[in-house]
Amino acid sequence: MRQVIVKQWFESEGGYGRTPRYSLHPDADACRTFAEDHQSDRLHPDGKAFGAEVDDDVYEELESSGAGIWFSGRVRMDGKDVELGKSKN
């Protein structure tokens, strides 16, 4: 398992309310860069970022992406598996 930063976002779609989304980042600087590049009127970070662990395959994808990736799936936090979001892709 590898340590990453998880950023929570909210996507607002007319008539559908707010949908949570998540992005993964190798470090805090990459998280800030990703947030600056992807924020829009419809999609914005909610200010929450936290540490978690991911498996090696997810981390390899993250490393090759640069500043971050959109993510839905399991991460490990405080010794427990946590499911993040549903796929919107």
Image: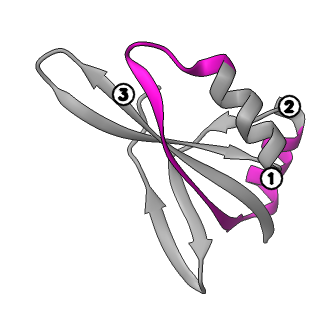
> Disc 1 on helix, strand or loop?
helix
Whole-percent x, y for residue 44 in the image: 46, 28
Where does the magenta region start and end? 37-63
Q: Which residue is mark 3?
A: 11
- The amino acid marked with disc number 3 is Glu
For marks 2 and 3, the one nearer the N-term is: 3
Identify the residue shown where x is 54% and y is 62%. 74
Q: Is residue 14 above or below residue 27?
A: above
Q: Is residue 7 above or below residue 45?
A: below
For marks 2 and 1, the one nearer the N-term is: 1
Q: Which residue is mark 1?
A: 59
CA neighbours of label 2 inside 10 A, class few (<14), some (14 to 19), many (20+): few
For marks 3 and 1, the one nearer the N-term is: 3
Q: Is residue 44 above or below residue 14?
A: below
Residue 41 covered by magenta stretch: yes
Camera-side mark, 3 or 1: 3
What is the image's colouring? one colour
Q: Measure the C-alpha gap from mark 3 to mark 1.
A: 24 Å
Q: Measure the C-alpha gap from mark 2 to mark 1.
A: 11 Å
Q: Which residue is mark 2?
A: 66
